[in-house]
Image: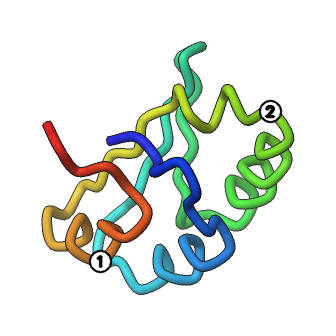
Amino acid sequence: MKFKKNADYMKFFATVKKCKGDVLFYTLEGDQLNLSSTISHFLFMTMMGHEGSMISGNVICENEEDVELLKEFLDTEK
C-alpha cells in the first residue's frame, strides 16, 4: 500500500505502535524497514525529506487487522 498524499507521519508512527504485527516499509531500491523498530523510525523520518521515496515506497502489514488501524494514512485500494 502507498501512503496517502497528506498523511500525518507522526500520527502514523503513534498508530504503528498499536499494531499487533510488524509494519514494513519497502523502498524502490529494495530496502526494508520495520517501522515498529526505533532505528527504522529514525531512518524513516530522515527519508521524509525525500518525498519521492515516501510516495513510491510500499507499506506492508503482516497482520491484516493492522490495515484497519492504518487505513487513515494508507491507500488501501488494490
Q: Is residue 50 left or right of residue 16?
A: right
**Residue at the extreme front:** 6
Q: Amino acid at mark 1?
A: Leu
Q: What's the distance in space between the residues labelled 1 and 2, CA to CA?
A: 25 Å
Of pointers 1 and 2, the one earlier in the residue sequence: 2
Residue sitting at 73 percent across and 35 percent down? 51
The amino acid beneath tag 2 is His
Please, what secondary structure does the residue beneath circle 2 have? loop
Residue at 62%, 38% in the rendered image: 54
**Mark 1 secondary-structure assignment:** helix
What residue do we see at 46% from left, 51% from top?
Answer: 4
Question: Please, is residue 48 above or below residue 41 in the view?
Answer: above
Q: Which mark is residue 50?
A: 2
Quadrant where the image shows the C terminus = top left
Give x and y (percent) for residue 49.
Answer: 86, 41
| Colouring scheme applied when the structure was drawn | rainbow
The residue lying at 57 percent from left, 82 percent from top is: 14
Q: Which mark is residue 69?
A: 1
